[in-house]
Amino acid sequence: MATITIREALNQAIREELARDEKVFIMGEEVAAYDGAYKVTKGLLHEFGPKRVIDTPITELGFAGLGVGAAMVGLRPIVEFMTFNFSILATDQIINSAAKMLYMSGGQFKIPIVFRGPGGSAFQVSSQHSQALESWYAYFPGLKVVMPSTPADAKGLLKSAIRDDDPVVFIEQERMYGNKGEVPDDPDFTIPLGVADIKREGTDVTIVARSLMVPVALKAAEQLEQQGVSCEVIDPRTIRPLDIDTIVESVKKTNRVVLAEESHPICGVNAELSAEIMERAFDYLDAPIKRVSGADVPMPYAKNLENLAVPDVARIVAAVREVAYLD
Amino acid sequence: MSKQTAAPPSRAGAEEQSSTSVIDTPAEVDRKQLARERDEIKERQKDRFAGLNQEQLIDLYRQMLLIRRFEEKSAEAYVAGKIGGFCHLYIGQEAVAVGAISAINKDDYVFASYREHGHALAKGMSARAVMAELFGKATGCSKGKGGSMHMFDKDVGFLGGHAIVGGQIPLATGAAFASMYQGTDQVTLCFFGEAAVNQGAFHESLNMAQLWKLPCIYICENNQYGMGTSLARAMSLRDIAQKGCAYEVASEFVDGMDVLAVREAVLRAVERGRKQSLPTLLEVRTYRFMGHSMSDPGNYRTRAEIEKYQERDPIKLFSASLLERKIVDEKRLEEIDQQVRHEVEDAVRFADESPLPEPEELYTDVYANPIDPSRNR
């Protein structure tokens, strides 16, 4: 076990998969000569050369579609969006081409491609650069959506995503690239897609959190422990397909749920989780499900306003106390 | 300063006129002039016979006729309620797909738009598989899940049937990228209508193709209308081949009513693709004789305009050339027509008698690696 950052874990995953399979290549803006806008692809151009580590023009729709076309005839592209905000330009190719190709061709054309990059809020980059888009992509059958929260998850899940035969939207978190954690040394270490992880066991309240909200929820759980409340923190890790069974089992044990996310609340992943839990475990609930989401506004620039827009430890603590009827 | 005395023509009147009468079409059909023009095209076509043997020439004719008869049957079946959804017919444009695809190999790739029945047939898909797909049957090329706009056949290198205008252009660029990446000498043909040229996907793709030297041949089938909107009302620079200059992509104009002109132009582009790994943009000027789709009465075009292009019908033009060059006689043409009609009728019978997809098929082919989370734990 080595202790490395999420950035380094992602870099290892891409490096190992490039070395493992000639059909894998990575393309995107500044991924090669610049070593990646966020340095996730650092050193890869030097190691693998310009054929497999490709700087693209700023042309997101074009290179996303080019990747899908290359995947149709057998390559396994990793397409980096400098941030997922820019993937909005490429949604036609991600949704209309990648997600639907296998189905509308009657099973003839699989699309083994990974669309990856940072998403969610960063630090004071305002409205157009601070968006959590997972609910958009998770809406579409044909796509898989992955959001890691630790270095080990980042590495193991990205390797699985690259080896998967379906289009995977792999959303990292801009604020978390420097977060450290232990990662197994085994080059064949992978984590299967579609399996939730219980990040902390507990008995009183279940907190479901993903990406940036996982460390926040874990801090909240620590504080709550001192207040006499035992929280179970579950990270679904894969939004589609969703490991709802693990969440429901936890709810059956704790009977109380808080759902935390940094994305907007309307039509979000938490809304879906809430419906699933209601349908599967209504009789086990001792309190209404409580959602903690990002503010329903475009992200503001001012530091104090930005802090108000992103859920923090205090809000999760308050929500847990509310469903536990402590206040 | 002179005072304006005459009122300008009313704007409303001008718009009304432009919506029903477009481009420089004469109000009355000058049949003698049309015949003269047709004969000139025919003479040019006959000069292109060199290098093709009798069998090849007849096969080009047979393929165009197959598409024509296939589409006529599709229209009938659509009216009879056998085909649902949208149905965009290729009648009038047959020379483009047939001429172009005759210039490539079986392992080369073809991408097309939603008006792709003809390209599918020309790339070697069976009339049965295409018709059964139109009928939404399990035996269709896409198992009844794609329909008119999403024909696919991996075995013959036909990579779709894409129904967002311009969406196939980056995809085809990607297939050409894969050929470059893997060092094969395959080329990719990418067909799209002229309206797709206004999409960003076109410009983004041409830029990357030239930048990275990708053997993709972009074939713009300029039939002059994006649904009901004429080119003149939708595009500032209407000489589409010129747009290649913006990306240093080699380009040329091609007469899309002459199957041999199309073939020759694509052969030149294929050579550029295979030898230099470079893209080409071809603007192929053609015309669709039917509406945009089966639900389009087409009242934005004049009869005179349609008749002008029907006079240049690529199939009539080519049969006349074949007869004049004594490649075929009337009897042979009649035999070919009978054979093609039989093939299309067989396809309709096959489609009609084929089973619907099983209800379980609703949930198959969503994922290549389906994941059941409960099984993973």
Image: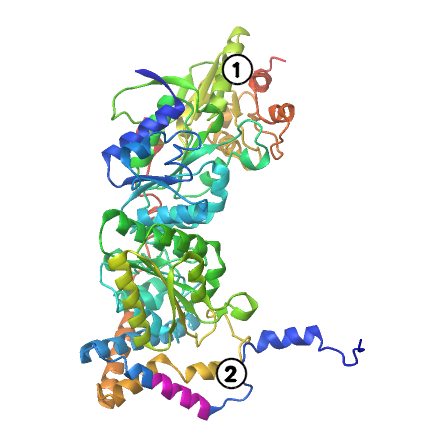
User: Mark 2 packing: few (<14 Cα in 10 Å), some, or many (20+)?
Assistant: some
| Three-letter amino acid code at the position of disc 1 | Ala
- Looking at this view, name the residue that lies furthest to the front: B1
Q: Which residue does the image show at 29% across and 37% down from the upper left?
A: A49
Q: Is residue B33 magenta?
A: yes
- Residue B64 percent across, percent down from the top left: 31, 75
Which residues are drawn in magenta? Answer: B32-42
Label 1 residue SS: helix
**Viewer-nearest residue: B370 or B284:** B284
Describe residue A271's horizontal placement relative to residue B193 as left or right.
right
| Three-letter amino acid code at the position of disc 2 | Arg
Dot 1 corresponds to which residue?
A220
Dot 2 corresponds to which residue?
B303
**Magenta portion: prevailing SS class:** helix
Quadrant the C terminus of chain B occupies: top left
Quadrant the N terminus of chain B occupies: bottom right
